[in-house]
Image (cartoon, rainbow, N blue to C red):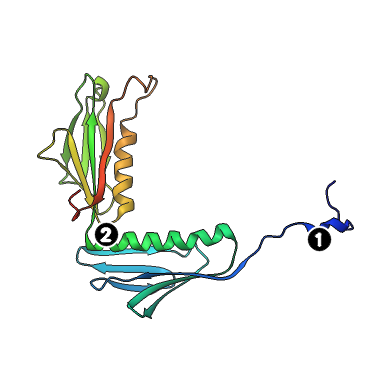
Amino acid sequence: CSFCSACPARGALPGKMKTILSSRTLDVPDTVEVTVNCRVVTVKGPRGELSKSFKHQRVDLQLIEGEKGKQILVEKWFGKTKQLASLRTIISHINNMFGGVLQGYRYKMRSVYAHFPINCTIEKAPHRIEIRNFLGEKRPRIVNMLEGVTIKRDKDVKDQYILEGNDIENVSRSCSLIYTACLVKKKDIRKFLDGMYVSEKGLIQDGV
């Protein structure tokens, strides 16, 4: 039966436990300058500056002096299990910002076609790509890169394009915009595999 307020078994229902205090820390590299103000993290490094707001998360975010140098401390009070997962997410976002200002991110995309060759031209310096002749269509597909992202043609590999930037989110989203611009509509996608696909991704200085 559904437990009512007078049912003696009501007290036997399992309750959701809350952890009083959970925290995670992240070491700050020596060549990176970090400022934390009102849950807005700003990172400065050799390649530039990135800033990200975490005001949508109810956490304590501060910069502390640890045993091995500066650290970023993220704390969550009285959080449930799923809420505590946001601590690792915030740490991962900040760690990606460190990688961006230190090394930068590089994604590689290749155009795949069976019959109609896909013609791509890069316009307005390296910030816009125009895709033509996709499945023989006359309509050009124009994709603008997001802020801080550049695109260029790979000189060594045919039909390969390189996207670079400091913000991993903008680089990956720019790849997604190119991919979605070349989706096959009203055809069997198991047979029509034409499009632009991500082939490699990683840090610039890692040689990806």
In the rendered structure, which amino acid carries the disc numbered 2?
Gly
Classify residue 1 as left or right of residue 151.
Answer: right
Decide which of 47, 89 is in the foreground and name it: 89
Helix, strand or loop for disc 1: helix
User: What residue lies at 31% left-to-right and 61% top-to-bottom?
Assistant: 97
The residue pinned by badge 1 equals 11
User: What residue lies at 44% left-to-right and 59% top-to-bottom?
Assistant: 89
In the rendered structure, which amino acid carries the disc numbered 1?
Gly
Choose the circle earlier in sequence order: 1 or 2: 1
User: What residue lies at 73% left-to-right and 57% top-to-bottom?
Assistant: 14
Residue 101, given in percent of the width and then of the height, sits at 25, 63
Number of callouts: 2
The residue pinned by badge 2 equals 100
- Which quadrant would residue 140 be assigned to in this image? top left
Residue 135, given in percent of the width and then of the height, sits at 26, 21
Q: CA distance from mark 1 to mark 2?
A: 52 Å
Classify residue 35 as left or right of residue 155.
Answer: right
Helix, strand or loop for disc 2: helix
